[in-house]
Image: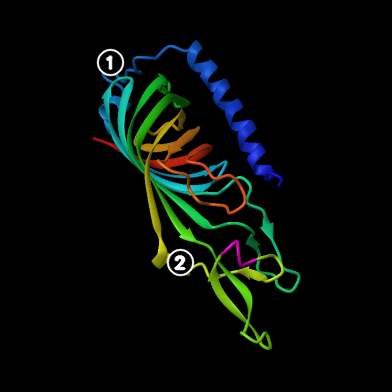
Amino acid sequence: MKYKPWYFFFSGLVPSVIILLLSMFVLSKPSTGQEVGGGLSTSVLLRKEKAFSAHISSNGIGFGYRQGKQNSVTRKTFFEAEISTMKHEKEIRSHNYFTTRSYYYGKLNSMVVLRPGIGIHRIVSEKPYWGGVEVRYFYFAGASVAVLKPVYLIVIKANSAATEYYYAEEPYNPDEHFPDNIMGRGSFTKGFNELKLIAGGYVKGGFHFEFGKDEKIVRSLETGFNLDLYPKHVPLMAFDKNKNIFITFYISYCFGKRYD
């Protein structure tokens, strides 16, 4: 089975960006803050911060919320909560010749990841007084909860005498459902009463770039990686190797406010 193009895009481009930014960090020195009128910088006076985010990763998309405060000139502590979809890298979209409803052959479950955690931002380079870009590196850790919903398919069924055929919506069963009797994906609402949870943990690291002149407004881009670890293999696909460790690279946009 072939990997999707976006998998190679993120697995190649994002690590290269992270390596480049890491080189910048090694060559940089933390600043002690820009003074405004002979006093503390505005960013130090506005110690609290909260922001929402939207991200795209090598295995899905998601949203997040982060809230924290400045502990020192170069250090910030945050709580975050994220929700993100997680796809198997070998999911291939399939079609039946008699219908337009696509499906992923062999897919057992859809997966969504919930990540509550805490972390640290450390400032590498502060914004100058006229604006510009503030550079931080960060690391987070916390719980990772995999929420699994069984995949439902529309399949062709026959009565006991094989004289009549009809459509049925059933959870995917690799022993009964094949390309010749699968008509397409089932309803998205099917399976919510059969959710399963797998609790684990995650770590995250990367670089954060805040831009703009107004210190009260948070606008930033972030790039990094997530590592989710579970105590057992997560059943996503029927015929491909399932795993308990997921490493994803991501890019996100954050927006929010800073206050005291």
Identify the image quadrant of the C terminus: top left
**Badge 1 element:** loop
Report, in whole angstroms, how far the alpha carbon at label 2 lies from the one at label 1. Answer: 62 Å
Dot 2 lies on which element? loop
Q: Residue at x 45, y 52 (%)?
A: 112
Residue projecting furthest to the front: 161
Q: Residue at x 52, y 42 (%)?
A: 243
Left or right of residue 55, residue 121 in this image: left
Q: Nearer the viewer, residue 202 or 178?
A: 178
Camera-side residue: 151 or 34? Answer: 151
Residue pointed to by mark 1? 38
The percent position of residue 148, horizontal first and vertical second, equals 45, 55
Which residue is identified by label 2? 191
Tell me, yes or no, whether the highlighted magenta stretch contains residue 242. no
- Measuring from the top left, give residue 116's x and y in whole percent: 33, 42
The residue segment tinted magenta is: 173-177
Q: Residue at x 54, y 42 (%)?
A: 57
| Location of residue 209 with respect to 61 vertically, above or below | above
Q: Position of residue 140 (x, y in %)?
A: 37, 32
Query: What amino acid does circle 2 point to?
Result: Gly
Q: Taking 184 as reference, is 62 left or right?
A: left
